[in-house]
Image (cartoon, helix red, strand yellow):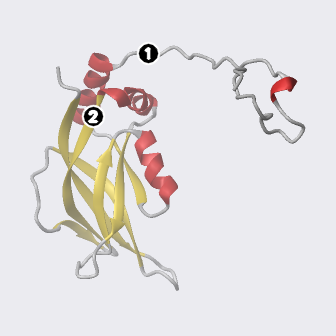
Amino acid sequence: MSKSDSMVVGIVVERRKLDNPWVDHSWHVVAVIPGAPVVDEWVELRRGEGWVQFHARTLPIALFRGETEGYKYNLSLDPPRIYVVLREADEADDHEVEPFLATVCPYEAQDYMDSGDEIVETSAMPEPVMAWLAAFVERHHVDRPFVKRKRKPYDPREWGADGTPRAGRRRGGGHG
């Protein structure tokens, strides 16, 4: 039985002109395309006044049995989301951002948001991805009961006035 599964999705990125004195445009993920073909270079999909959309990259979404709690939470959102991590592109690239990772685990996405080095965008999860994710969670999720950690009662004989363990005694009540 496999511990993981994956699906490829095309990442659609939009460059939108801004009316701002400091920034002339912004980049946003506007859609994901399940089962999209792999692209070697950005492919223009649509254009309008002040905006253009590209199929920027095709990325795998990988699912792992140990992350089903996050997937289950994502499926409870209205709507469920796909998180796309964008990184600054190389200077030689025509575009300022590059899609780096696609995930359906909000906890993994949060780690990238916390780092501050990447941009995390979201897109509504398409129905085929939602069905695939729900089936994976159904097969692999195991509810883990919450177990409150038991603390030992405080023993003032083990600690000095400054809050450090007393000489000759170890934390946990053993004698050293």
Residue 117 in the image: state x and y as whole percent: 45, 64
Residue 90 in the image: state x and y as whole percent: 27, 76
Label 1 crowd bin: few (<14), some (14–19), many (20+), radius 10 Å: few
Under circle 1, the secondary element is loop
Q: Quadrant of residue 147?
A: top right
Amino acid residing under circle 1: Asp
Q: Quadrant of residue 82?
A: top left
Q: Nearer the viewer, residue 28 or 17?
A: 28
Q: Is residue 67 left or right of residue 47?
A: right
Q: Nearer the viewer, residue 100 or 76?
A: 100
Residue 104 vs 100, above or below: the answer is above
Residue 124 vs 155, above or below: the answer is below
Amino acid residing under circle 2: Leu
Residue wearing tag 2: 63
Could you tell me which residue is drawn at 63 percent across and 20 percent down? 149
Could you tell me which residue is drawn at 37 percent across and 62 percent down? 28
Q: Which mark is residue 143?
A: 1
Under circle 2, the secondary element is strand
Label 2 crowd bin: few (<14), some (14–19), many (20+), radius 10 Å: many
Q: Is residue 29 left or right of residue 111?
A: left
- Dots 2 and 1: beta carbons under 8 Å? no
Please tell me how many numbered marks the rendered image carries.
Answer: 2
Q: Which quadrant is home to the N terminus?
A: top left
Q: Which mark is residue 116?
A: none
Q: Nearer the viewer, residue 151 or 129?
A: 151
Q: Is residue 3 left or right of residue 108?
A: left
Could you tell me which residue is drawn at 42 percent across and 61 percent down? 119
Residue 21 in the image: state x and y as whole percent: 52, 85
